[in-house]
Image (spheres, rainbow, N blue to C red):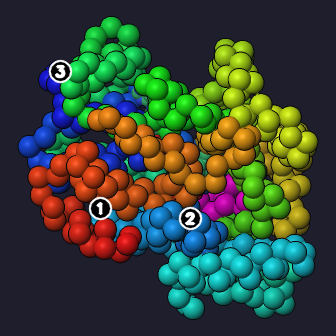
Amino acid sequence: MAHSFDVIIIGGGILGTSISYFLSFLNKSKKIAVIEQAHNVAFHTSGRNTGKVHAPYLYNPEKKKLFAKSAFQGYEMWEVYAKLKKLPFKKDGVIEVALDEKGINVLEKYLKWGKQNGLEDKDIELLNKEELKKIEPEIKCESALCVYKDASTDYSILTNSIMKDSKENGTTFLLDTRVTKIKKEKDRWAITLNGDHEIYAKFLINAAGGEAVDIAHDIGVAKKVTDVHFRGEYWRVPSKYNNLTKSSVYSVPEFPDYPFLDPHWILRVDGSCEIGPNAVPVFSPYGYNKSENIKEFIPKMLEMLGSGARKAIFDKQFQELAMNEIQSSMSKTAMVDRVKKFLPKIDANKITEKGTAGIRSSIIDENGKFVPDVIQVEDDASFHILNYNSPGATGALPFSANIVNHLHKTGLFTNEEEDADCGPWKFSKIIEKLE
Ligand SMILES: Cc1cc2nc3c(=O)[nH]c(=O)nc-3n(C[C@H](O)[C@H](O)[C@H](O)COP(=O)(O)OP(=O)(O)OC[C@H]3O[C@@H](n4cnc5c(N)ncnc54)[C@H](O)[C@@H]3O)c2cc1C
């Protein structure tokens, strides 16, 4: 194995793998490595999510412009890529339902945002309850936003395929390999792997998902923010419910300033259905079980109490919402009841199998507020992506291309080719559509 690289990316989630993909097309002679502690790419959040390729109707085009544009373009890119490689992608739509008058106003806002973000009349429409009944008789609501340009996929399969392409261009993937220490030495980074040997990099990209903040802190970056982890749990429903609806169903979030959405009714790309996710506070980005949470409880609590997260923990509204989520973790009926509000036919007693939980790490600023947007920090020979949350998987390809373009434009890292073909896309065209 080579011991020196031009670029090292920490994190083989969908983001780190996609960044390596574009770098590998634009920098054929540079040595690029992705370091992933798990046995495979997309082992954590990228392979444990709802699997939706989201249309950008939930994002304010003024405040979340890059995210909205990335989701819009990401949909088209994943559709093309999945077709080319014969990977799962099903345009099965999503229905966002309002259960009261307040919710209807929110749907009207979403319709406007969706169109401002590029959706056409044929992609999205607002229906009243009678109109919806004709196409989805089992759904109970006051009004519904039907988003036809929304799809289901398996992001683990997509990420593995992107890794394969990146490897064919020369990228090294070091799997089962954990970055345990990072040290700056003059003009290079010394990176300790698995606590026992060092490799070196001229440039470092931190795409470490739930550990991105810890890695940034370790090298003195983004000191004012911290993160809180939330476990999103799912229940698989028996196959007799598989044809209950033709699309996935989401309900209007009641508290959009907090990372708590009500669980959805989910159609998976393989035709099965699930309920979820909730958002249960946990103490580790890998807090899938009790023992990991007990191990991390004291260090995480100390970190949170010494940061802006302290204010969030003592916020009454946050406490109430968190308790609600904990209850829906302890009681299957409490979780299913949240979906029964709009899909009354489901019976919690018939549901017995848990789905695969995934963890979201949300950033809190020094004032105790959840940061709604992704945070990108550049520093001396390093670039950090924090708070890369939903719909991060949808937008991963264009978002990564944008990072590579940004690094090149600001001179932090120079591409050899400005306008390479990157698989089915021309790099310049991806960037043009994001501007
Ligand atoms: C419950 C849930 C549902 C979601 N649903 C959707 C959806 O339907 N559609 C959508 O578009 N988005 C969805 N998202 C968001 C999406 O999954 C994320 O935005 C995306 O997966 C983040 O990718 P990532 O590569 O940044 O992080 P990750 O997938 O977490 O990858 C980071 C990787 O870094 C590795 N790593 C960390 N530290 C180290 C270290 N020290 N050494 C080596 N490796 C390290 C980790 O092992 C991990 O594999 C959902 C998220 C959650 C939690």
Q: Does the beta carbon of the residue at mark 1 sit less than 8 Å from ligand 1?
A: no
Residue 257 is tagged as none
Name the residue at 41% across, 47% down: 15
How far across and down, in percent of the image, does residue 61 sit? 57, 73
Q: Is mark 2 on a helix, strand or loop?
A: loop
Q: What element carries label 3?
A: loop
Q: What residue type is labelled 2?
A: Lys
Q: Nearer the viewer, mark 2 or mark 3?
A: 2
Q: Report whether 200 appears left or right of 292.
A: left
How far across and down, in percent of the image, does residue 196 sit? 33, 8
Q: Would you name the residue on which mark 3 appears?
A: 3
Q: Report whether 410 appears left or right of 339.
A: left
Q: Distance between the residues labelled 2 and 1?
A: 31 Å
Q: What residue type is labelled 3?
A: His
Q: Quadrant of residue 250?
A: bottom right
Q: Would you name the residue on which mark 1 appears?
A: 85
> In the image, is residue 269 part of the stretch drawn in magenta?
yes
Q: Which of marks 2 and 3 is nearer the N terminus?
A: 3
The magenta region covers 264-274
> In the image, is residue 265 part of the stretch drawn in magenta?
yes
Name the residue at 50% across, 81% down: 118
Q: Would you name the residue on which mark 2 appears?
A: 64
Q: Report whether 109 appears left or right of 180.
A: right
Q: Earlier in the sequence, mark 2 or mark 1?
A: 2
